[in-house]
């Protein structure tokens, strides 16, 4: 019988740091965000002191003054994530890259789950937990109960029901506080209550999404394994600009950076946008934005940068204080599927400079060569840990 497995790395960011710094093993370790303001991951040792994910670093230090706090390094975390993915896919081709530290895969022989767990620990240095069950929702629930470094295989209904009776309904991925309250009003408090409820009631409360979860909890595979990520409707790059600013040169520097990041992502997914949107979050005022229809579907940096600059020209005014920027590519077409009209200009090859820039960056590292406009934001490139952002981790289904 074909079963579904859920593999989840244990304290992944901390475990990744321990791979290159073995001396951290057994010690309370916290990984902090880019600005060093909050804890984004913690070891089991630090968890015992009461430190919570998302907690401000100054509060964490009160609870765990002897903790070791490290700045995050998503470049390293993605490298280990891809190594894990390769190991899983080599043995189980039907594997979904759900998130940076979670995979779903189809498994024929559940006893192989332990072998895979030991292989990843030996060759990647990462402890992982695996749950195996009749559906992906059950597999995830059961892997969560087996942490850390456990393997739980559940294939019979009686054991399923026993475990589901012990789990809150909000342990189900996709059931948050609001949905949980709706269910509680109907006496549905545990996962077993949910599975035993009338399917039509669940659908009326939580729409088809809830009904799919009901089927999954009852052992029916209605959520398939997706080895390939569905095509994007939009691709965007942006975020905070490192502090609100009214400096036009700095804003244009950030525009160049986000355009370069956007082109990099379009290249990776082999798509070309036909529309571009610029959105700016303004401090103490309404957000402003502009969009433009491109003359043709393209991902050439020079053409997208020119379009981005035109949009900024339209919305910029003296005194504007910008805190966040997003550049959004829409009307995406895959390479080879761009329908052209009689009057569209012919495709032009990238300039030799753009080709050389890409080749150097692929070899040496991201943004080693970049647009001169980014010289106005030197703080983004002075610190190497800024060069990689969590939103650039590609291929995963879950965000």
Image (spheres, helix red, strand yellow):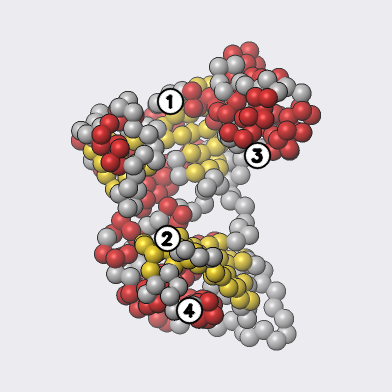
Residue 340: % across, % down: 69, 78
Q: Is residue 189 left or right of residue 359?
A: right
Distance from disc 2 to disc 1, alpha carbons, whole Å, reads 35 Å
Mark 4 vs mark 1, CA separation in Å: 54 Å
Please tell me the numbered disc located at residue 240: 2
Q: Nearer the viewer, mark 4 or mark 1?
A: 4
Q: Which numbered disc flags the more N-terminal residue, 1 or 3? A: 1
Pointer 4: what residue? Answer: 317
Quick one: label 4 or label 1, which is nearer the N terminus?
A: 1
* Residue 224: numbered disc: 3
Labels 3 and 4 touching (C-beta < 8 A): no
The quarter holding residue 379 reads bottom left
The first of marks 2 and 3 along the sequence is: 3
Q: State the SS at label 2.
A: strand
Give the residue at mark 1: 147
Mark nearest the camera among 3 and 4 is: 4
Q: Is the C-beta separation of discs 4 and 1 under 8 Å?
A: no
Does the rendering let one see residue 378?
Answer: yes
- Tell me the quadrant of the picture where the N terminus can be found: top right
Tell me if label 1 and label 3 are in contact, CB under 8 Å. Answer: no
Q: Where does the image place residue 92, in percent across and percent down from the top left?
A: 53, 38
For the residues marked 3 and 4, what is the alpha-carbon distance in whole angstroms?
Answer: 50 Å
Q: In 3D space, how far apart are the residues under numbered discs 1 and 3 (Cα atoms)?
A: 24 Å
- Circle 3 Cα neighbour tier, 10 Å, few/some/many (<14 / 14–19 / ≥20): few
Whole-angstrom CA distance, mark 2 to mark 4, is 20 Å
Residue at 73% x, 29% y is: 202
Q: Earlier in the sequence, mark 2 or mark 4?
A: 2
Say if mark 2 contacts mark 4, CB within 8 Å.
Answer: no
Question: Badge 2: few (under 14), some or many (20 or more) residues near its Cα, within 10 Å?
Answer: some
């Amino acid at each position: 019988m074909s079963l579904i497995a859920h593999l989840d790395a244990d304290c992944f960011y901390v475990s990744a740091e321990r791979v290159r710094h073995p001396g951290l093993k057994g010690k309370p370790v916290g990984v902090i965000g880019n600005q060093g303001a909050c804890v984004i991951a913690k070891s089991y040792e630090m968890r015992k002191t009461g430190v919570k994910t998302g907690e401000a670093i100054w509060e964490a230090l009160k609870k765990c003054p002897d903790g070791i706090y490290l700045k995050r390094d998503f470049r390293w975390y993605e490298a280990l994530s891809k190594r894990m993915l390769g190991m899983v896919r080599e043995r189980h081709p039907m594997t979904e890259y759900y998130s940076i530290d979670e995979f779903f895969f189809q498994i024929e022989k559940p006893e192989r789950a332990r072998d895979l767990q030991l292989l990843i620990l030996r060759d990647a240095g990462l402890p992982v937990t695996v749950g195996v069950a009749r559906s992906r929702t059950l597999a995830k629930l059961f892997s969560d109960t087996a942490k850390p470094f456990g393997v739980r295989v559940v294939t019979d209904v009686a054991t399923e029901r026993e475990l589901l009776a012990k789990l809150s309904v909000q342990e189900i991925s996709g059931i948050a506080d609001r949905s949980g309250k709706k269910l509680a009003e109907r006496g549905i408090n545990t996962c077993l209550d949910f599975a035993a409820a009338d399917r039509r009631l669940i659908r009326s409360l939580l729409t088809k999404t809830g009904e799919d979860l009901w089927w999954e909890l009852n052992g029916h595979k209605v959520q398939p394994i997706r080895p390939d990520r569905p095509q994007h409707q939009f691709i965007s790059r942006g975020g905070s600009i490192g502090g609100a600013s009214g400096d036009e040169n700095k804003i244009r520097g950030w525009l160049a950076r986000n355009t370069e990041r956007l082109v990099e992502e379009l290249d990776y997914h082999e798509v070309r946008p036909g529309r571009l949107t610029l959105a700016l979050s303004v401090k103490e005022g309404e957000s402003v934005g502009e969009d433009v229809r491109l003359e043709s579907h393209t991902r050439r940096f020079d053409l997208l940068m020119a379009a981005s600059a035109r949009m900024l020209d339209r919305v910029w005014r003296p005194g504007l204080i910008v805190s966040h920027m997003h550049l959004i590519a829409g009307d995406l077409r895959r390479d080879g599927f761009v329908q052209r009209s009689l009057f569209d200009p012919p495709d032009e090859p990238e300039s030799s400079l753009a080709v050389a820039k890409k080749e150097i960056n692929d070899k040496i590292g991201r943004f080693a060569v970049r647009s001169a406009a980014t010289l106005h934001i030197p703080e983004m490139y002075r610190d190497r840990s800024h060069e990689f952002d969590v939103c650039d981790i590609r291929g995963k289904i879950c965000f």
